[in-house]
């Protein structure tokens, strides 16, 4: 780390402090409401956060490694190979160096990662639209209806932190950092491919722009050579060695090479482990009834809601929700968000909506798509402070209540 980086980092954290304090307050409210609600139902909020659904699978991987599976009466096989390894690795590491259980370690990792994610979202939004929009973006991410997942021993917070900081690194020309974080994101969730796509889209675009910038100058030199130019014909051209952001071009290329190694490495390892070849991970996901069908199963699920009343109201709500997502993405395009953010948010949204997975999990799968919140953050930032505080406060209360109700329900989030 250079002297400059050492000086900049504390200022960055200080600048993010209001956003992080606001984020922590919203999440504390959610946990408090969850604790009260759960106690009223004779349930443990700690158990709900650490030892149900996916969190149990991550804990088993951390404790026992891979190889555990459950065979259902209908023939489906639920294998823990479906769960990417970075969160279990961190759980195992924290358990080894502390008195925490594996489940407790998962909760601590998630809580710390959620703060890192909030900081990364603030960094991206502030870089693009200023500090007020940065604070608003973080608060909007905190008050999402399924925001309680950010405080669970799940991998969403860890993945969002890695994705946000990788995108920030791309936007600021730190290609090795971007590639390394994308690699780690690829070890966290299958949707890590979205971060890889963003890094590659930015890298390819930069390469094409450099080629376009080099071509006219090369043409001019060939058609109108300056006297004595032959003396410098072997001198290297800076454009061939530096990217447009001033970083050496080899850093961008290396960052792009690093980006897919995490996801590709784990998928290939699963294929080798199962003996099913490079596509073996798809077979593992098929055992969970997960796959990519272009949205057919989800569309059929929504359509079935309109066959009766009052389920038709739920169907209408789902349609409104999908329309809102599409509208937000269109606004992001119209506001000329940088290409890496558009690619990332687009891939996350596409995979969430077009996967044939458990439909109740789709809101959770959309949590990492924070660039979709930036248009709303800009609108919120334009309000007076009192008005924006009232809006965020009201939504935070509603989110806390919904999160407690949702997590105390019977189905996995």
Image (tube, helix red, strand yellow):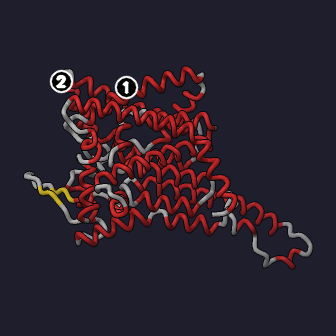
Please, what secondary structure does the residue beneath circle 2 have? loop
Residue in the picture at 28% in, 37% down: 299
Categorize mark 2 by other alpha carbons within 10 Å: few (<14), some (14-19), many (20+).
few
Q: Can you tell which mark lies on residue 221?
A: none
Residue in the picture at 52% in, 59% down: 200
Q: Whole-percent x and y of residue 38?
A: 24, 33
Q: Which residue is mark 2?
A: 308
Q: Is residue 75 left or right of residue 125?
A: left
Residue in the picture at 54% in, 37% down: 19
Quarter of the image for residue 102 reads bottom left
Q: Which residue is mark 1?
A: 398
Please, what secondary structure does the residue beneath circle 1 have? helix
Q: Quadrant of the N terminus?
A: bottom right
Quarter of the image for residue 91 reads bottom left
Between 109 and 187, the one lying in front of the other is 109
The answer to which of marks 2 and 1 sits earlier in the sequence is: 2
Q: Whole-percent x and y of residue 206?
A: 62, 58
In the figure, 265 relative to 402: above or below? below
Between 221 and 197, the one lying in front of the other is 197
In the figure, 278 relative to 389: above or below? below
Please report contact status of discs 2 and 1: CB closer than 8 Å, yes or no: no
């Amino acid at each position: 780390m250079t002297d400059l980086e050492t000086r900049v980092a504390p200022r960055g954290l200080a600048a993010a402090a209001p956003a992080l304090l606001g984020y922590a307050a919203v999440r504390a409210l959610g946990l408090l409401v969850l604790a009260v609600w759960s106690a009223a139902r004779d349930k443990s909020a700690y158990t709900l956060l650490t030892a149900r659904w996916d969190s149990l699978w991550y804990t088993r991987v951390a404790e026992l490694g891979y190889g555990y599976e459950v065979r259902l009466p209908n023939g489906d096989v639920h294998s823990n190979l479906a769960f990417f390894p970075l969160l279990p690795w961190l759980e195992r590491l924290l358990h080894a160096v502390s008195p925490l259980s594996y489940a407790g370690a998962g909760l601590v990792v998630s809580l710390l990662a959620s703060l890192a994610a909030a900081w990364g979202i603030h960094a991206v939004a502030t870089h693009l639209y200023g500090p007020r929009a940065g604070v608003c973006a973080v608060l909007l991410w905190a008050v999402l209806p399924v925001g309680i997942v950010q405080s669970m021993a799940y991998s969403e917070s860890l993945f969002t932190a890695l994705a946000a900081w990788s995108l920030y690194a791309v936007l600021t020309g730190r290609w090795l950092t971007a590639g390394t974080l994308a690699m780690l994101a690829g070890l966290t969730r299958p949707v890590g491919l979205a971060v890889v796509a963003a890094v590659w889209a930015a890298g390819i675009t930069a390469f094409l722009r450099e080629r376009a910038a080099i071509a006219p100058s090369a043409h001019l030199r060939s058609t109108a050579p300056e006297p004595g130019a032959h003396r410098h014909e072997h001198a290297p051209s800076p454009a061939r060695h530096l990217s447009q952001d001033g970083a050496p071009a080899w850093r961008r290329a290396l960052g792009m090479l690093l980006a897919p190694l995490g996801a590709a490495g784990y998928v290939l390892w699963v294929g080798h482990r199962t003996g099913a070849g490079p596509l073996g991970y798809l077979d593992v996901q098929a055992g969970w009834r997960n796959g990519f069908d272009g949205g057919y199963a989800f569309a059929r699920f929504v359509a079935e809601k309109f066959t009766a009343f009052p389920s038709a109201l739920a169907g209408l709500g789902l349609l409104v929700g999908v329309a809102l997502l599409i509208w937000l993405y269109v606004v992001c395009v119209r506001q000329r968000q940088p290409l890496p953010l558009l690619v990332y948010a687009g891939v996350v949204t596409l995979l969430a909506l077009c996967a044939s997975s458990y439909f109740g999990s789709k809101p959770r799968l959309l949590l990492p798509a924070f660039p979709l919140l930036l248009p709303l953050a800009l609108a919120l930032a334009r309000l007076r402070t009192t008005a924006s505080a009232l809006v965020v406060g009201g939504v935070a209360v509603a989110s806390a209540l919904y999160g407690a109700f949702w997590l105390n329900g019977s189905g996995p989030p």
